[in-house]
Image (cartoon, rainbow, N blue to C red):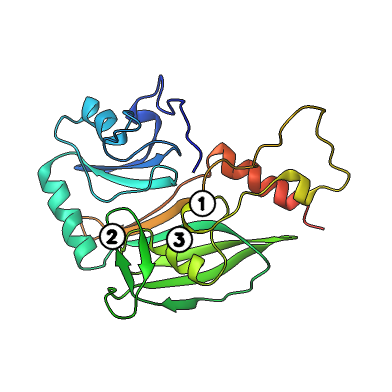
Amino acid sequence: MKKNTQNPLKNRSLNDLILHEGSDYVVINKPPFVSTLADRSNPHNILDLARILFPNAKVCHRLDKHTSGILIIAKEEAGYKYFSGLFEEREVTKLYHAVVPGKHNYNELEVDKPIYTTSNKSRIDFHGGKPSLTLLSTLEIYKQHTLLACMPFTGRMHQIRVHLADMDIPIVGDHKYGGKDIFLSQLKRNYSLGRGKEEKPMIQRLALHAAGISFPDQDGETVKIKAPYPKDFSVLLNQLEKNRF
């Protein structure tokens, strides 16, 4: 993954990211290139930002640094315990959007393969892996790529990334699991790059976005939230659409 030295949180507060607020939690739209927790390679992280507003804040789950989208943050310990119970009982439904190579037409395809996790990487392992289930559906088919809706029913590290890579359709830009970059020259006829210039990938991270979530709140009401795409993901999809044929 390419290193990004910019601070995505510069001049921003947690309020700028909040999609929904409950009495003891907030749901935010995490930008790409920022860690959920403190990271040695990048000091800018969501938890520190949250604790400016809520000193006792705790994140209820994690997103990889390069993944954008929905993240739940508890304001206090009570909220954290509540969501820990929801995740443990699998009462939280998460939806991700991913761009993969090739044309694929899936309608709630079940990918049921066990995943074994080490300190920083996961793999399919039918002997030592833990049960892992992901549901895949096609949202859009483009000229050379597909936009997938991915619903993980278990919470293994890098679950969607590993399942898609095992299907030989690793997420665009996901170098850790074999994903390749996508360039405009691959899509656009008669594309010309200026002399002496090096073409950059259309998205400089893995093309994965946590797009939706639903869960029961403490009043028994079902909360459903969607997260708009960040700019880089929107630009990628717009170019794929413009160069569909």
Closer to viewer: mark 2 or mark 3: 2
**Front-most of 201 and 112?**
201
Q: Which mark is residue 118?
A: 2
Task: Give the amino acid type for the residue marked by disc 1 in the picture.
Answer: His
Give residue 53's quadrant in the image: top left
Q: Secondary structure at mark 1?
A: helix
Neighbour class for label 2 at 10 Å: few (<14), some, many (≥20)? few
- Labels 2 & 1 near each other (Cβ < 8 A): no
Given the current orientation, which residue lies at the most extreme left position? 78
Give residue 86's quadrant in the image: bottom left
Distance Cα–Cα, label 3 vs label 1:
10 Å
Residue at 23% in and 25% down: 52
Residue at 81% in and 47% down: 188
Closer to viewer: mark 3 or mark 1: 1
Residue at 44% in and 76% down: 111
User: Badge 1 is on which residue?
Assistant: 175
Give residue 214's quadrant in the image: bottom left
**Front-most of 110 and 86?**
110
Q: Secondary structure at mark 3?
A: helix
157 sits left or right of 10 in the view? left
